Image (cartoon, rainbow, N blue to C red):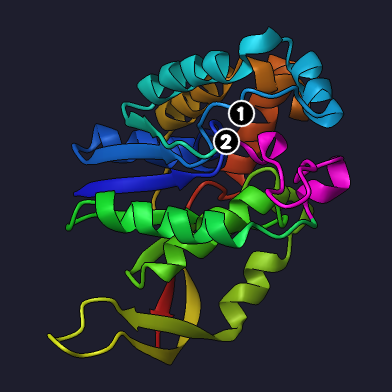
Amino acid sequence: MHWIYLSPHLDDVALSCGGLVWEQSRSGDKVEIWTVCGGEPPDTPLSPFAQSLHDRWRTGPDAVKDRRQEDRLSTQALGASYRHLDWPDCIYRFHPESGLPVIQGEYDLFHARPEDTAIHDLTETLRRTLPKRVRLVSPMALGDHIDHHLTRMAAERLGVPLLYYPDYPYILHLPRVLEKMELSNLRRRIVNHEPPPGGEVVEQWARGKWSRMERAISEEGLLAWQKSIAAHHSQISTFWAGLPDMEMAIRNFWAGGGGRLWRIKIT
């Protein structure tokens, strides 16, 4: 089986479901992690907020280059392969009309809406480049980060079957959201992007339910998961006091059933 995981940033899949990726790779599946916002920042001065993050990461002026190398080591620990798409992280993007940063502070990360042009262009890039036979996995966009919404919105516009992973660490702050999802009905947009000659694209809505896909993650998978996150060493201080704190947090997440996938079953 061929899996492609869409990762908004260079660490999101490793954080959210690295153990599962390792298990799939170990079983002989082909697994790729495509990072959406893995592009170089524009050749302009950083915003004060972006500079503050660089200072915290201690990466210096080549932050994206350094983080890409971290991601190579991380995906290697999971037995997967990587692809870095060309969109810059939201902290590097600017509004074309005003010239102001899309993200001017922490608040904007979780309240700004993805740019319409970015959603459209990412959708079309995925449509052109995704293999025909692949299981595509998207973030749920829990926590409302702008780049997580960008990734999910573009994936859903493809109109193909999707699987989803709950975004770590945001899921930790939403402990009952998955339980509510399993009990709720929703409307799922189904798009036919290959109409008959002369026909039109058809959009329909269907009823669906969220369903958890159970798959065990072994102790060995947990260790690979922790190793893959440790490779993103510039990001450790964003979430934890250090590596031992990270390892304990991921172990607790694993023990509680975290790191699995979800799907929407049409009813």
Task: Specify the quadrant of the image occupied by residue 132.
Answer: bottom left
Residue under pointer 2: 88
Residue 204, position as x, y percentages in the image = 39, 91
Asked whether the beta carbons under mark 1 and mark 2 sit within 8 Å of each other, the answer is yes
Look at label 1 and name its amino acid.
Pro
Residue furthest front as drawn? 97
Q: Local crowd at mark 1 within 10 Å, few (<14), some, or many (≥20)?
A: few
Q: Nearer the viewer, residue 255 or 186?
A: 186
Q: Nearer the viewer, residue 183 or 90?
A: 90
The answer to whether residue 164 shows anywhere in this view is yes
Residue displayed at 87% across by 40% down: 105
Instruction: Inspect the magenta stretch and tell me whether residue 245 lies in it.
Output: no
Residue displayed at 49% across by 20% down: 68
Q: Nearer the viewer, residue 87 or 137?
A: 87
SS label for mark 1 = loop
Residue 31, position as x, y percentages in the image = 29, 39
101 to the left or right of 150 = right
Q: Earlier in the sequence, mark 1 or mark 2?
A: 1
71 to the left or right of 257 = left
Residue under pointer 1: 42
